[in-house]
Every structure is written in C-alpha cells, then in structure tokens.
C-alpha cells in the first residue's frame, strides 16, 4: 500500500524523504535529525517545516515516537511502512536522476 | 543569541501553535531554541508560517498547492458568470411579467445598494489595472530558465495580454458610445456619471449594455440610438474575448493565490455592481402603466445575490481550503519550502522537487 505515500505529502514530501532517510540509520530526536540531514544532504530543515513533516509522517504511521524519559528529547523511529514508502520514493528519484544524467551525457557527447 | 533569550523567544513562538500540537511535540521548544541560538536565518518566519498552517489545519482548512490554487482561482472568477447570466435573464423576465404598482419604499435595500455601488465601483476601478499589471509583470519577468524558455514564455503571454488590452479598450469605447447616446440603461443608470468614478462607468456601461428588455421587446431596438445599439451587439463579443484572454493569462502560469483571490473578488464585485445598479433604478422608478413594472424583481435579485455569495464562499473555501493533503507537484526549478541550502552546499535541488 501507499506506493506514492511521500509524494502525496505535497510540500512536505522533500523534508519527509530526508527525515525517513535519516531515521533509516536509526532512531533520532529532533535536533540530531536536523544535524544528520544537514550532514548527509547539505540541506538545513527549519524546525517549523521539520515538525510539520514529522506530524504528517506520524499521522500516516511511517514513523513512531519512541518512549523517552526526557520529554525534551523525544526520539522517532521509522516503521515498516515508512521503510517501504522511502524505498519507493528513492527508487522513483533514482529513476528520474538516471534519465536526467543519461540525457545530459547524451547531450554533452 | 544567549541561551535564555533564545528559550524565551522559542517559548513565545511555540505559543502560536494550537495547544494540542504543543502537547504532541513537547521537544519542539528545545529544538527551536537551539536553532535560534545558532542565529539561523528565517527560523521565526518558518515557525509563524507552519503554526498558521497548523491552526488552519485544526479548523479543517488545509492550504492547497499552487496548481490547485490556480484552478480554484479560475473557478472563483468564472463560476459566478453562469448564475449571473442566467439569473439576469430571469430578472428581466420578472420585469416583463411582474406586478404593476410595486411599492419601492424600501430604504434598507437602497442603503445596501448604495454601499455595494460605492464599494464595487471602487473595486472595478482597480480590476483592469490589476489584471494588466500582473500580466505585464509576467511578460517582463517570465521566470527563470534558459533564453529559449524565456522567449517561449514571453510569446505565450503577449497574445492574451494584447487581446485583453484591446478588448478592454474597445469595451471602454463602446461604453463611452453608449453613455453619450442618451439611452437610459436600467442596468447602468445608477453608475457614477461624473468625476473619477465615471471612468469605471465607461467599460461597465458597455458590459451591461446587452442586458436590456429590448430582447423581450425587439421593437425597442428600432428606437435605440446608434451608440447604444452598437454597444448592445458588440459588447458581448469583446466581453467574451476579454474573458478568454484573462482565462489564458491566468491559466498560462500559476499566479500567486492571493492575486487570484483578488481578481475573483473584483470580478464578482463588478457583477454585483451591475445587479445592484439595476435594482436601484427599479426601486427608484415606480412603475407606470405603460412602463415595465418591477414585479418580483426584488426576489430575483435577492436570489441572484445569494447565489453569487454562495459561489464566492465556495470558491474562497476552495482557494484556501480543501480536503486532505495538497497533491504533489513537480517544479524542477523550485527550492523546497522551509529548507535552506548552506552556502557551501553542492547538493542537487532535483532531490527536493515537490512544493
């Protein structure tokens, strides 16, 4: 189900992809998520946008908050549905990227 | 920014969110405070925007994507045309078959009519410059892209812009012609006849010229002065041409949602103006035996205004609200809202194509 779940998130689609990609490496809380995304994607997610995306990902069951003693540092974990949605989204992006790169290479030749 | 100061500001900003949202993300304040401490650019604005979005969302209103806003804006502008034309015909039918001797002493209606008249005349004054201004701005700045792309964009805009400007100029000339002819047009009689407001009268006068009881009494055409007669027959052609040109302009590129709403409201206001002007004339000119009688016109006008208001309400709700999440859109040259590439960034924007 939900082969295009991330695409359906509209303007949160990009941030959601980044968040899921980060959580695919293990559970993280908000600030660590920001830093991790900044490191691997070189994109800074503003907190308002990031939590907007987090809310929608939780609503769709793609991530879940993990119980924590410290409420100020609540980690999130990717679910099986989230893993599948991320796989579909990244495959789609890779397909588009491959086409673009192939055409660029063809045009340059 | 010192930590205490950042925490205070974060606490203030988080209050913009609905209470249930704050309870759901208790860690948000901490993250926001750290971001503010790092002097991140645009953080406060991002929070204000997202908090507003969450407030609206908690009320069941979801902001639409740009493409949907454009479609909704078009609906808002053009949907009222249907009830307007249909019910205007109904209005004149009522004139024809209505009761004789209707009492026109209904001050609240007249006051409301005056108010509508003033507001819509003002709105009409800005409608043409606004639409032309937006169009010309788009022609001058067709967006990013290659030289060929810009040329193509410019070509796509030149024709509808020229058509709209021409149609509006002809309509204004026709309105002037009708205005000078001396023919009493019930649909335009209450429009401003002098001063600055007279300018708006000219093209509105042409737009409403075809709304005439002469269609029911064709003999009236024979006594019409040439200026009015020309306007009656040519105005629909140029009115439709201007509408088509405007449609092309609006649909060629997604305009900002706010501009579409303004255009829609102004278009609607112009229609209300014509109707209110008719109503005012009808109520201030008691029927005589050899003249057209108001009959149930008041009822028809109330129905007309009601339908217009409902259409505007539905259109506005469609523009700012909807059901479910906005659909994904792909704009290769648009950067993701709420994201900021570091100065040293070498990442591809193609990764973040949805807006």
Image (tube, coloured by chain):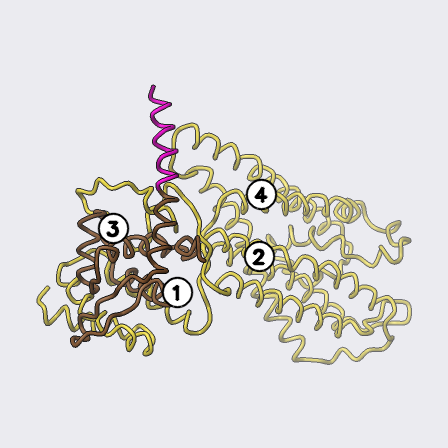
Q: Which mark is residue B124?
A: 2
Please state, as top left, top right, bottom left or bottom right, where the N terminus of chain B lies in the image: bottom left
Name the element at disc 2. Answer: helix
In the picture shown, does residue A81 fall above or below B61?
Answer: above
Q: Which mark is residue B248?
A: 4
Q: Residue at x 23, y 69 (%)?
A: B28
* Mark 3 → mark 2, Cα distance in angstroms: 41 Å
Residue B241, x across and y down, in percent: 66, 43
| Residue at disc 4, secondary structure | helix
Relative to residue B85, is residue B26 drawn left or right?
A: left
Task: Give the image location of residue B270, x and y in percent.
Answer: 62, 59
Nearer the viewer's eye, disc 1 or disc 3? 1
The quadrant in which residue A8 appears is bottom left
Question: Which of the chains is yellow?
Answer: B
Q: Chain of mark 3?
A: B
Q: Residue at x 52, y 54 (%)?
A: B126
Q: Nearer the viewer, mark 3 or mark 4?
A: 3
Mark 1 or 2, which is nearer the eye? Answer: 1
Q: State yes or no: residue A91 in magenta.
A: no
């Amino acid at each position: 189900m939900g082969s295009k779940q991330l695409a359906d998130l509209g303007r949160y689609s990009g941030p959601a992809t980044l968040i899921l990609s980060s959580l695919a490496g293990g559970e993280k809380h908000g600030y660590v998520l920001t830093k991790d995304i900044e490191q691997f994607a070189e994109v800074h997610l503003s907190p308002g946008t990031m939590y907007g995306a987090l809310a929608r990902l939780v609503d769709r069951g793609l991530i879940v908050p993990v119980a924590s003693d410290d409420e100020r540092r609540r980690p999130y974990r990717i679910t099986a549905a989230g893993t599948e949605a991320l796989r579909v989204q990244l495959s789609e992006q890779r397909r588009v990227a491959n086409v673009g790169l192939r055409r660029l290479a063809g045009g340059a030749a | 920014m010192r930590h205490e100061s950042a925490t205070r500001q974060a606490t203030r900003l988080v209050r913009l969110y609905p209470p249930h949202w704050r309870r759901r993300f208790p860690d948000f304040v901490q993250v926001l405070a750290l971001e503010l401490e790092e002097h991140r650019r645009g953080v406060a604005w991002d929070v204000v925007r997202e908090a507003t979005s969450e407030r609206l969302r908690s009320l069941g209103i979801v902001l639409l994507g740009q493409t949907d806003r454009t479609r909704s804006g078009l609906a808002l502008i053009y949907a009222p045309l249907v009830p307007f034309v249909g019910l205007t015909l109904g209005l004149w039918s009522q004139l024809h078959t209505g009761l004789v001797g209707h009492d026109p002493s209904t001050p609240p209606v007249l006051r409301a009519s005056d108010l509508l008249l003033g507001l819509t005349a003002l709105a009409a004054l800005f409608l043409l410059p606004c639409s032309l201004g937006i169009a010309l701005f788009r022609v001058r700045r067709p967006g990013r892209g290659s030289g060929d792309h810009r040329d193509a964009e410019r070509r796509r805009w030149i024709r509808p812009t020229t058509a709209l400007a021409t149609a509006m100029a002809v309509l204004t000339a026709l309105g002037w012609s009708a205005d000078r002819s001396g023919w009493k047009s019930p649909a335009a009689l209450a429009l401003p006849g002098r001063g600055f407001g007279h300018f708006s009268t000219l093209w509105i006068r042409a737009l409403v010229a075809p709304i005439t009881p002469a269609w029911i009494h064709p003999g009236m055409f024979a006594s019409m002065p040439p200026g009015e007669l020309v306007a009656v027959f040519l105005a629909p052609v140029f009115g439709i041409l201007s509408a088509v040109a405007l449609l092309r302009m609006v649909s060629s590129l997604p305009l900002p949602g706010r501009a579409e709403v303004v255009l829609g409201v102004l278009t609607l206001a112009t229609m209300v103006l014509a109707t209110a002007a008719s109503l005012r004339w009808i109520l201030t000119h008691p029927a005589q035996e050899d003249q057209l009688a108001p009959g149930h016109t008041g009822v028809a006008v109330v129905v007309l205004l009601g339908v217009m208001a409902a259409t505007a309400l539905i259109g506005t709700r469609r523009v700012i609200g909807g059901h479910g999440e906005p659909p994904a859109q792909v704009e290769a040259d648009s950067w993701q809202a709420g994201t900021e590439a570091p100065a040293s960034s070498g990442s591809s924007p193609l990764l973040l194509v949805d807006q």
